[in-house]
Image: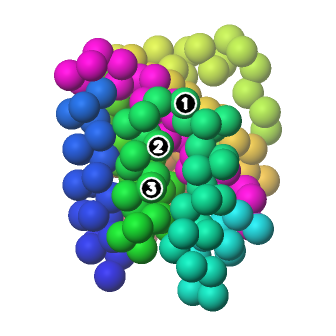
């Protein structure tokens, strides 16, 4: 079922991305999609109202039409949100926004990375890690960092589906494997 939802999200994202590329404002549309997805994820009352079968479609549409101009001023993104509501796929908004973001990143030669470390990384270390990831991927890297207290030391970087594990635990496991073999 998750694969089907991902396929549907990519289909909608691809359609709106094509419109954005044609109009040469695909990054702006992506920002609006991210804003709507964030609203969906954070506003429980809105999410429950728009997905509750007790409310009529006309009531849901009125709620959404009242919110959209504040979050997504372009007609294209508003039309997409209303179409998703009418087709009962409004819950796919966050997945569509993620798929759209991946398409934008691909078009612009960017990669997103998440770097986990046992302690907060200073700016110089973050810069060094970002540059190393850029050399490894051949793309510009947008990096976010997280502190993971379960790590003993080192870092774990996830970029474009690739996991680079430089944690102390991974090194100890490798050493144990060498000793046992």
Quarter of the image that includes the C terminus: bottom left
Q: What secondary structure prevails in the magenta region?
A: helix
Q: Are marks 2 and 1 in contact (CB under 8 Å)?
A: yes
* Side of 100 relative to 47 (left or right): left
Instruction: Find residue 179 and report its image quarter.
Output: bottom left
Quadrant placement of the N terminus: bottom left
Q: Quadrant of residue 14?
A: top left
Q: Residue furthest front?
A: 58
Question: Whole-percent x and y of residue 118?
Answer: 74, 44
126 above or below 40?
A: above
> Does residue 150 show up magenta in the picture?
no
Q: Residue at x 50, y 67 (%)?
A: 91
Mark 1, residue position: 73
Which is nearer the eye, 62 or 101?
Answer: 62
- Mark 3 sits on what residue? 82
Report how far apart the C-alphas of labels 1 and 3 lie in the structure.
13 Å
Residue 150 vertical placement versus 27 (above, below): below
- Please give the residue where the numbered disc 2 appears in the rendered image: 78
Element assignment for label 3? helix
Up the image or down, 59 lies above or below 128; here it is below
Q: Classify mark 2: helix, strand or loop.
A: helix
- Tag 2: Cα neighbours inside 10 Å, few (<14), some, or many (≥20)? many
Place of residue 58 in the rendered image (x, y in percent of width and height, measured from the top left):
54, 69
Mark 2 in CB contact with mark 3 (< 8 angstroms): yes
Q: Which residues are magenta?
A: 21-44
């Amino acid at each position: 079922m998750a694969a089907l939802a991902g396929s549907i999200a990519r289909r909608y994202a691809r359609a709106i991305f094509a419109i954005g590329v044609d109009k040469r404002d695909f990054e702006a549309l992506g920002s609006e999609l991210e804003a709507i997805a964030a609203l969906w994820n954070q506003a429980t009352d809105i999410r429950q109202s728009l997905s509750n079968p007790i409310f009529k479609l006309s009531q849901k549409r009125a709620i959404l039409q009242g919110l959209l101009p504040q979050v997504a001023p372009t007609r294209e993104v508003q039309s997409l949100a209303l179409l998703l509501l009418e087709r009962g796929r409004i819950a796919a908004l966050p997945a569509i926004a993620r798929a759209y973001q991946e398409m934008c990143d691909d078009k612009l030669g960017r990669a997103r990375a998440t770097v986990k470390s046992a302690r907060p990384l200073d700016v110089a270390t973050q810069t060094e890690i970002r540059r190393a990831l850029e050399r490894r991927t051949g793309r510009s890297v947008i990096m976010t960092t997280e502190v993971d207290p379960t790590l003993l030391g080192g870092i774990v970087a996830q970029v474009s589906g690739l996991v680079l594990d430089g944690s102390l635990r991974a090194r100890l496991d490798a050493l144990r494997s060498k000793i046992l073999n």
